[in-house]
Amino acid sequence: MSAAEVYFTSMRCRLGDSLLSKLDRLMTAAGLEKIDFNQKFCAIKIHFGEPGNLAFLRPNFAKTVADRIKSLGGRPFLTDCGTLYVGRRTHALAHLEAAYENGFFPLATGCQILIADGLKGTDEVEAPVPTGIIVKSAKIGRAIMDADIVVSLNHFKGHELTGFGGAIKNLGMGSGSRAGKMVMHNDGKPSVTQKRCVGCGTCAKFCAQAAISFNKKKASIDQAKCVGCGRCLGTCNYHAIENSWDTANSSLNYKMAEYALAVVYGRPNFHINVINQVSPYCDCHQENDAAVVPDLGIYASFDPVALDLASILAVNAAVGVKESILGERSATGPDHFTNIHPATNWRDQIDHAVKIKLGSDQYNLIEVQ
């Protein structure tokens, strides 16, 4: 596969300019206008953020993207699918309320919002994965598959299971219906290191499967009930919950990349990573930790793999923020994502995405002023 083109712009703005204007110039420079948007439905895949989390992308970014697509004759809508874990986005009504609370409503975003997998997360399409090694068909939210064009607008950040979250994760995990998310998660099920457990009960509160029980104030996980969603991993403040198998995170990364391929295969697609407020955990949490590196810029490409890799390397090249989780960890080294989440290997996600021809790990980086 030939080298992809990845365009980027910094967060610096001269007087009279704005970051939103720079995003608009970035999309134009990266070639968004090469896509025929005329009278086409365009799914802008985004994460609306769990209420309480303040690291998710501001709605202003979404409006800039939607306005540009409309100027090209397109019919954009913002979309996401329901979650597998307990929270405020498990069904469409709660999801819409959460999106509105975080500022995503038509006046602010310039377009409508559709929850892609319907009211209860069951409205899905079995989408083929032509080069899939593990997954031959993916359960994707219907509204996403009904769209003519897909644009992913991604908050680039860390993730407790996949190492990082960018375009591949937003497309793959984010576009999966609730059944699709279970397919991606079900190889790995966590267990409790009971000597670390303090019996606070937080993990059970966030377990949608009622798989966590307590005996003498120590948690245990019923493996038969657990679906491996990993929510308990992120909510435990005492590092008492860990994945049971070393290969689980790799399997999740592989399947997530194959789901992303199902979403973009056979139709125009374009991708944007905003590297700001780089939190160590997913925006699915109802809170966010301090950013681990300074705000770095916005990246865009037709290739989601090259885009994510360029974003990873940019974050790893940045000096970590001392007053963040990076400053607390004794581990040192050039890889911030591994330092934050030692049990993860983000390279699995990139390498597998290249193997299935989702994109390229070779790219040319082009700056836009």
Image: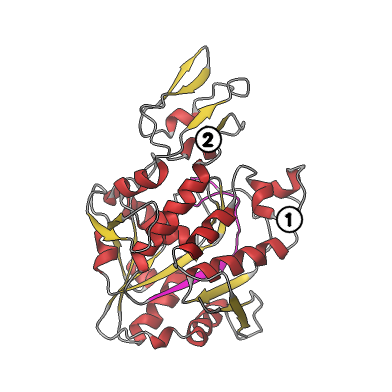
What colour scheme governs how the chains and residues are painted in the rendered image of this protein? secondary structure
Q: CA distance from mark 1 to mark 2?
A: 31 Å
Q: Which residue is mark 2?
A: 245
Residue under label 1, please give it.
321
Residue at 24% across, 60% down: 142
Please check the rendered image and state whether residue 272 is part of the magenta-colored stretch, yes or no. Answer: yes
From the viewer's perspective, tell me whether residue 357 is left or right of residue 324.
left
Question: Up-down: is 59 above or below 1?
Answer: above
What are the residue bounds of the magenta stretch? 269-287
Residue closest to the far top: 216
Relative side of 164 to 48, left or right: right
Q: At 36% from the left edge and 28% from the top edge, which residue is drawn?
A: 225
Location of residue 25 with respect to 240 vertically, above or below? below
Q: Residue at x 32, y 86 (%)?
A: 36
Residue 115 in view in this figure: no
How many other residues sit within 10 Å of disc 2, few (<14), some (14-19) or many (≥20)?
A: few
Amino acid at circle 2: Trp
User: Mark 2 or mark 1, which is nearer the start of the sequence?
Assistant: 2
Residue 2 point in image, percent of width and height: 53, 79
Q: Position of residue 175 (x, y in %)?
A: 35, 58
Callout 1: SS:
loop
Question: Helix, strand or loop at disc 2?
Answer: loop
Predominant secondary structure in magenta?
loop
Quarter of image, res 153: bottom left
